[in-house]
């Protein structure tokens, strides 16, 4: 389970003359995501740059079938 939680601060902007007034939502938030078996949970990384949260979830390498030669005597 991957949980992302954060808080938005209240923003309020007012200007005079030909008026501009902005309100944005604020408060805390929390989202949870169920991870599959193919994700390496111990190597998850996250970066927050210019207002964008990027979460990297590396996959587990698949076990590839092996081919074994059988020697005929």
Image (spheres, helix red, strand yellow):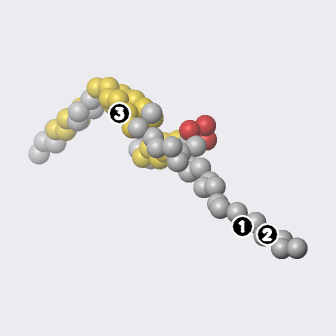
Name the foreground residue: 65 vs 5.
Answer: 65
State how far apart marks 2 and 1 are (Cα). 10 Å
Crowding at label 2, few (<14), some or many (≥20) Cα neighbours within 10 Å?
few
Q: Quadrant of the C terminus?
A: bottom right
Q: How many marks?
A: 3
Q: Residue at x 37, y 33 (%)?
A: 32
Q: Residue furthest right?
A: 73
- Against 49, residue 25 (above or below) is above
The disc label shown at residue 10, or none: none
* Secondary structure category for the residue under label 1: loop
Q: Is residue 32 rendered to the left or right of residue 19?
A: right
Query: Which disc, if any, is residue 70?
Result: 2
The percent position of residue 65, horizontal first and vertical second, equals 65, 61
Label 1, label 3: how far apart the Cα atoms are? 44 Å
* Depth order, front residue of 55/60: 60
Tell me the mark number nearer the camera, choosing from 3 and 2. 2
Is residue 37 rendered to the left or right of residue 33?
A: right
Instruction: Identify the residue at the far top of this view.
Output: 28
Residue that badge 1 annotates: 67
Q: Which mark is residue 31?
A: 3
> Residue 41, image x and y in percent?
56, 38
Given this view, does label 2 or label 1 mark the residue nearer the observer?
2
Residue placed most toward the observer, 34 or 11: 34
Q: Which residue shows up at 84% across the image and 71% down it?
A: 71
Mark whose residue sits in front, 1 or 3: 1
Please tell me which of labels 1 and 3 falls first in the chain.
3
Judged left or right of residue 21, residue 42 is: right
Q: Secondary structure at mark 3?
A: strand
Where disc 2 sits, the SS reads loop
Quarter of the figure with the N terminus: top left
Tell me where residue 2 sits by quadrant.
top left
């Amino acid at each position: 389970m991957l949980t992302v939680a954060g808080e938005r601060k209240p923003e309020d902007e007012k200007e005079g003359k030909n008026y501009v007034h902005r309100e944005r939502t604020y408060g805390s938030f929390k989202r949870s995501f169920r991870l599959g078996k193919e994700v390496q949970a111990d190597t998850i990384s996250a970066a927050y740059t210019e207002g964008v949260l990027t979460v990297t979830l590396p996959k587990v390498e698949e076990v590839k079938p092996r081919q074994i030669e059988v020697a005929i005597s």
